[in-house]
Amino acid sequence: MDTDAFETLRASYRGGFLGKAIAYDNRQKEIPASLIRSLRWHPVRLISFLDRPYYYGAKKKYLDWIASRHLATGRYDLFHSWSGDCLRSLKVTKRRGIPSVVEIPTWHRDGGKEKVRRSKIAAPTENISSFQRWKNRLLLQRKRFIEEYKLADLLLVLSQKAANTFRVRGFPEEKLFYLPRGVDVERFRPGKRPRKFRAVFAGALIRRKGIQHVLEAWHRLNLPDAELWLVGFVHEEAKPYLKEFWRDNIRVVGFVRDPENYLSASTVHVFPSQWEGSAKVTYEAAACALPQITTREAGDVVRNGIEGIIVKPGDVNAIAAAVEHLYGHPEIVEQMGAILVRRS
């Protein structure tokens, strides 16, 4: 299970109301294994050779099926899950009158704009093999998410930007519960500022998180006595940008299990993501007292001009100007850092 799921489980366990959790794996030791059903050896592993969208969809549907069987016993008083994981389970909760809470990791499935009516042209199916038809049934289709939204009693949204994607589609305010992320402040702590200006980007190196815009802005600036650390798995889509905008003062750290050591050793965090629910890394950087150059799409933790600078997604000029501003004004970096220390 990932960090977010574990923290949710830990809170419910400490609160004394965890009945049963179902997860793909369970390697933690704090919560008794009797309360967690691990699907580590699930039969879907037999089709792990399929491309990720098919295998990913099959795993989620299997998890949903197992959860629905537990709910059908009537032993539970509340159901919590994540969008995409729980359509079958939600149908059971409706039949049995069990309240349900569904967490939205990012935004409404249709994005941030009001839905526009448009005609759809059906794709030809006569030439599709039976094997491909079977694979297609494994995919997580848009209608699955939409139906989950309707069936859930409460939707947990992680930022106001995410909440707005539901409001524009007519979801009532009482169905939306705004719940920002938390952070382990014992793990993520302020460190000593480096003598050299060090910008850090922490997260998967993918276009959605704005890595291409960070690299282009950094290349334009060509700042002396400065460096950029890239902390996260390097996806194929990022490699052309690394080649095009490479500078010798860029360090590709890659994926690490101790991002706190890199955040706390940096000057500023640059994270101009184009689409998140509420990026956990922005909370982690804030706990490390790092001023941030980020977007409202990344979440609500940064207040513009107070703990950092908010830019629009894809605005390379604004990203470059913000980096240059903090580079040239170390006193502002210290002021923002001091505010973050008090806030945490």
Image (cartoon, helix red, strand yellow):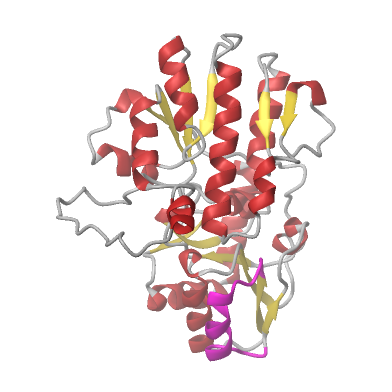
Q: Is residue 55 above or below residue 324?
A: above
Q: Is residue 1 left or right of residue 128?
A: right
Residue occupying the point 68% across, 35% down: 23
- Residue 214 location, x and y as percent? 51, 75
Image quarter (top left, top right, bottom left or bottom right) of the C terminus: top right
Seen in the picture, residue 260 relative to 235 is either above or below; the reply is above
Question: Is residue 318 rendered to the left or right of residue 179?
Answer: left
Is 237 colored magenta in this rendering? Answer: yes
Q: Which residues are the magenta region? A: 231-248
Residue that appears at 46% across and 15% down: 99
Closer to the camera in the image, 72 or 322 = 72
In the image shown, does 181 or 102 lie closer to the viewer? Answer: 102
Q: Locate residue 307, reporting x and y percent.
A: 52, 54
- The residue under the point 22% across, 34% down is 170
Residue at 60% x, 54% y: name it.
281
In the image, is 246 to the left or to the right of 9? Answer: left
- Residue 311 percent across, percent down from the top left: 40, 64
